[in-house]
Image (cartoon, rainbow, N blue to C red):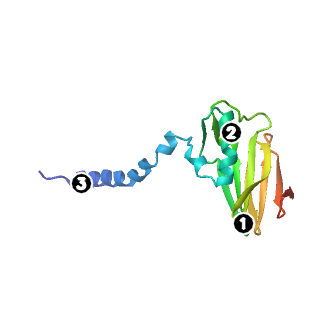
Amino acid sequence: MKLSKLTCTLLGGVMASLVLLQPALSYSGTAQHPWSRARIDMLPAEIRADVQKWSAACGGSIAAAQYFALYLTVPGAEFVALHFDEFQCRSGAVHCDSAGCPHEVYIATAGRYRRVLAVRAHDIRLSSANNQAFVELLDGHGSSRTLRWNGSRFVAK
């Protein structure tokens, strides 16, 4: 049986598409299961211990979405921002309201993490400029306020 040039071209295209799609399909589980306990388990020990305190209030079942913990590194420090709008709690003990959701920022110095900011906001964003860390607090009305890390805490910019 002799295949036409068009048929060979089409078959080659289908096979190439399958090869390219295979890696994407192997990662598609994230979209099907956006909440994961593993994201909490991968946090640094001090932060994980603080987050696990929610377990009792949540009825024992907690999980986090992909953007629950976001990291920023500047010379001399690493910051971790926790976004509790990306946190799943069966009982609803962690709740968002018109003021926003709980957010926390931790800093690592000398290999240890400590909480340096706890706020209720619609979102927070860590950023850096000129080797300095900033956190932008966003409310539900489109306004924002930026705080600057002064070496020991976040202060008004």
- Which residue corresponds to mark 2? 54
Check the image and report above or below for 17 versus 31. Answer: below
- Which residue corresponds to mark 3? 8
Compare marks 1 and 3 and give the one earlier in the sequence: 3
- Which residue corresponds to mark 1? 110
Q: Are marks 3 and 2 in contact (CB under 8 Å)?
A: no
Mark 2 closeness class: few <14, some 14–19, many ≥20 residues within 10 Å: some
Q: Quadrant of the C terminus?
A: bottom right
Eye-nearest disc, 3 or 2: 2
Compare marks 2 and 1 and give the one earlier in the sequence: 2
Compare marks 3 and 2 and give the one earlier in the sequence: 3
**Residue 153 visible:** yes
What amino acid is at disc 3? Cys
Check the image and report above or below for 28 versus 75. Answer: above
Residue pictured at 63% horizontal, 37% vertical: 88
In the picture provided, is 2 more to the left or to the right than 137?
A: left
Where disc 1 sits, the SS reads: loop
Where disc 3 sits, the SS reads: helix
Where disc 2 sits, the SS reads: helix
Eye-nearest disc, 1 or 3: 1
In the picture provided, is 7 more to the left or to the right than 16?
A: left
Q: CA distance from mark 2 to mark 1?
A: 27 Å
What amino acid is at disc 1? Ala
What amino acid is at disc 2? Trp
**Who is closer to the viewer here, 101 or 116?**
116
Say which quarter of the image contains residue 113.
bottom right
